[in-house]
Image (spheres, grey):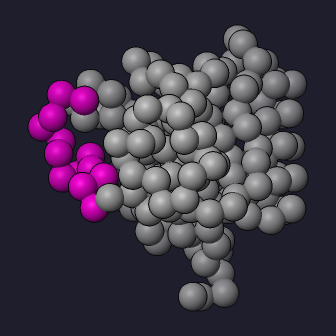
Amino acid sequence: MNEHFKLATFAGGCFWCTEAVFLRLKGVIKVVSGYTGGHIKNPAYREICTGRTGHAEAIQITFDETVISFTELLEVFFATHNPTTLNRQGNDVGTQYRSAVFYKDESQKTEAEKFIKLLEKENIFEQSIVTEVTALETFYLAEDEHQNYYDLNKEQSYCQYVIQPKIEKLMRYYKPKLK
């Protein structure tokens, strides 16, 4: 792997949503959907949906830090989901939909904590941020049908009503950062 390529792992509700957003950013090399933060090995989607595995639906981003920084990824992450709702994003409810930054090293942990403090100091959100900042342990790749879901299923109602508004927001506010 290129020495400038780094990994970031975020959970912000349904992984179809977060994956679709980050795939559109310059400097993002790859985004995969998966599961992390739980207590069972090799979880499957049907198990994740129960909310009893402890895992969150998450994405893992490979990015070129010479093009986009971890802090810029954090900015997009916090702008495209609600970090103030505990275990919920819209109608998706359960611990598997929690907001979390799974840091790879102390630098990412420090940056994420600093970014959250800044958002809170600036009163960006009306309620307190509940995003977890947790060490990344094992990231389990989701099944093939969950990879690149939005781009392969744009006509589905969930994609149109839940994901498309996030893409539109990204296009409106982050145009210079788009591929």
Between 163 and 66, the residue placed more toward the observer is 163
On whether residue 75 falls in the magenta region, the answer is no
Q: As displayed, is residue 76 above or below residue 34?
A: above
Q: As displayed, is residue 153 above or below residue 135?
A: above
Q: Is residue 91 left or right of residue 119?
A: left
- Dominant SS of magenta comes to helix
Residue lying at 70% horizontally and 11% vertically, measured from the top left? 126
Q: Which residues are magenta?
A: 144-158
Residue lying at 50% horizontally and 32% vertically, measured from the top left? 51
Residue lying at 72% horizontally and 26% vertically, measured from the top left? 130
Q: Is residue 79 left or right of residue 146?
A: right
Where residue 145 sits in the image (x, y, percent)?
24, 55
Q: Quadrant of the N terminus?
A: bottom right
**Residue 176 visible in the displayed image:** no
**Residue 83 visible in the displayed image:** yes
Residue sitting farthest toward the top: 126
Where residue 25 sits in the image (x, y, percent)?
46, 57
Between 96 and 10, the residue placed more toward the observer is 96
Where residue 48 sits in the image (x, y, percent)?
44, 41
Q: As displayed, is residue 5 above or below residue 123?
A: below
Between 170 and 43, the residue placed more toward the observer is 43
On whether residue 151 falls in the magenta region, the answer is yes
Where residue 140 sits in the image (x, y, percent)?
50, 61
Which corner quadrant of the image does residue 117 belong to? top right
Q: Quadrant of the C terminus?
A: bottom left
Q: Is residue 115 left or right of residue 65?
A: right
Residue sitting farthest toward the bottom: 2
Which corner quadrant of the image does residue 76 belong to? top right
Between 65 and 61, the residue placed more toward the observer is 61
